[in-house]
Image (tube, helix red, strand yellow):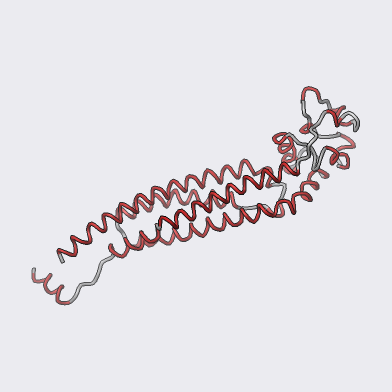
Amino acid sequence: MASRRMETKPVITCLKTLLIVYSFVFWITGAVLLAVGLWGKFILGPYISLIAENSTNAPYVLIGTGTTIIVFGLFGCFATCRGSPWMLKLYAMFLSLVFLAELVAGISGFVFRHEIKGTFMRTYNEAVQNYNAQDERSIAVDNIQRSLRCCGVLNYTSWFSSVYFPVNGIPPSCCANVSDCTSSDLRNATIAPTKVYQQGCYELVTTFIETNVGIIAGVTFGIAFSQVTLSGYDLVTRLIDVCKPRPCLRSTCAFRNSL
């Protein structure tokens, strides 16, 4: 028995060290996912809000998953140091759930990425036609036109048929030079084209979203498969196996009791 304890103790020490290192790396991946999720929410938010019918929850999944990973990464370190079988079992179950959540976020990101062009033309055109400069979608249109330096769907002529144009003209967010772009210029169908951006927003927005959602999905898949490669679940189950109490043979127990 003394020999078995001497053999088991180095194994436990080695497994604990490996699992603590893994938990630390796991904690870092949680911070990365949280950062990517927040970036996706705040950078892509205005663009995604214009595709309401097929909007993706991937940024929210990443934020939630990243936050939870940070908490459970610390829990994993604590459980490893304690060598508690039930804590380690809970940690192993959590690793499986996190892997599934990352796969869902990554898949939804890739699916959404390839559905953009099929819906964005219609939804963005509706946002332009019903623009009023006040509601959420109108504000999103303004933000897009300013940040991407574009105007309208395919070009500035998209605004000529909108409900906003007869009274107010083309929105100021289309102005190429704000200091040389008056409201009267924007209401004049002849002068306005010389004052606003010439390129439409459709191609720019779809390219921007496809690229950035692709980055988010790629990072998520990369982290998910790196966790599989590092085999954190296998480390936990092995540590559970060596840490859990084992029943002794009758002869061995009798020998222990005689000591």
Residue 233 is left or right of residue 159, and the answer is left
Residue 118 is left or right of residue 42, and the answer is right
Task: Tell which of 218 and 242 is nearer to you.
Answer: 218
Residue at the outermost left position: 259
Residue 29 locus on image (x, y percent): 46, 48
Which residue lies at the image location 82% right of the left edge and 39% below the top edge? 155
Residue 53 locus on image (x, y percent): 72, 54
Residue 214 is left or right of residue 201, and the answer is left
Measured along the vertical axis of the image, is residue 219 above or below residue 103? Answer: above
Which quarter shows the N terminus?
bottom left
Which residue lies at the image location 75% right of the left edge and 53% below the top edge? 119
Residue 46 is left or right of residue 197, and the answer is left
Residue 144: image quadrant is top right
Which residue lies at the image location 78% right of the left edge and 45% below the top edge? 127
Residue 233 locus on image (x, y percent): 40, 60
Residue 7 locus on image (x, y percent): 20, 61
Which residue lies at the image location 46% right of the left edge and 53% below the top edge? 226
Question: How many labels were placed on the picture?
Answer: 0
Residue 145: image quadrant is top right
